[in-house]
Image (tube, rainbow, N blue to C red):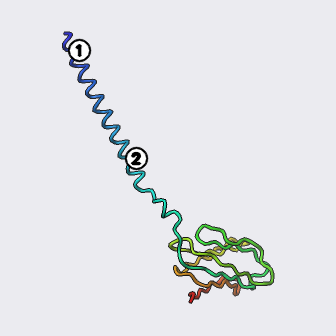
Amino acid sequence: MNNKSINSNKQFMIGNGILAFGVFFIVCLFLYLGFRGQSKGNEKGKTFEGLYAIEIANSFSGDSLSVYINDSLLFNSTLGNSSVKFQVKRFAEESTLMVVDNRTDEVTPFNLNAAGSQVQIQKKNGKTFIQETENE
């Protein structure tokens, strides 16, 4: 009878050891898969060639506009009687220019050239028009 209880305790301890080893293996596997997907340190400061020259025409005088590239706000102001020009370095693989009329919340999206370009934003008959010309 005493020998029987020792065998059951031994089997219980072996089962717990196998279970602990399995849990340890699964934790190591998840850590490996998690760290494998992270980007390297040198990719974080990745730079792109190209420059966007954006011009907002004076046809927007008196309107409140916001200009975004991807999710970055570049310009948010009420325009006067003159045109506004600014330049932005390309900072992503693909870029989308979004012009938002703050009064009506109307969004005008535009896919930008990957090499950089000159972009003119105009208003004609209440609609926003975006014209892009490639840099030379």
**Residue at the spot x=66%, y=68% of the render?**
73
Which residue is denoted by mark 2 in the rendering? 31
Whether pointer 1 and pointer 2 mark residues with C-beta atoms closer than 8 Å, the reply is no
Residue under the image location 19 percent in, 13 percent down: 3
Determine whether, in the image, residue 41 is placed left or right of residue 33: right
Q: Is residue 122 above or below residue 46?
A: below
Quadrant housing the N terminus: top left
Q: Quadrant of residue 95?
A: bottom right
Q: Is residue 112 above or below residue 16?
A: below
Which amino acid lies under the numbered mark 1 shown in the image of this protein? Ser
Residue under numbered circle 1: 5
Q: Please state which of residues 79 and 136 is positioned toward the viewer in this rendering.
A: 136
On the picture, is 123 further left or further right than 29? right
Q: Position of residue 22 (x, y in %)?
A: 31, 37
Q: Secondary structure at mark 2?
A: helix
> Dot 1 lies on which element?
helix
Label 2 amino acid? Leu
Between residue 128 and residue 12, name the one nearer to us. Answer: 12
Near mark 1 (Cα within 10 A), the count class, few <14, some 14-19 or many ≥20, is: few
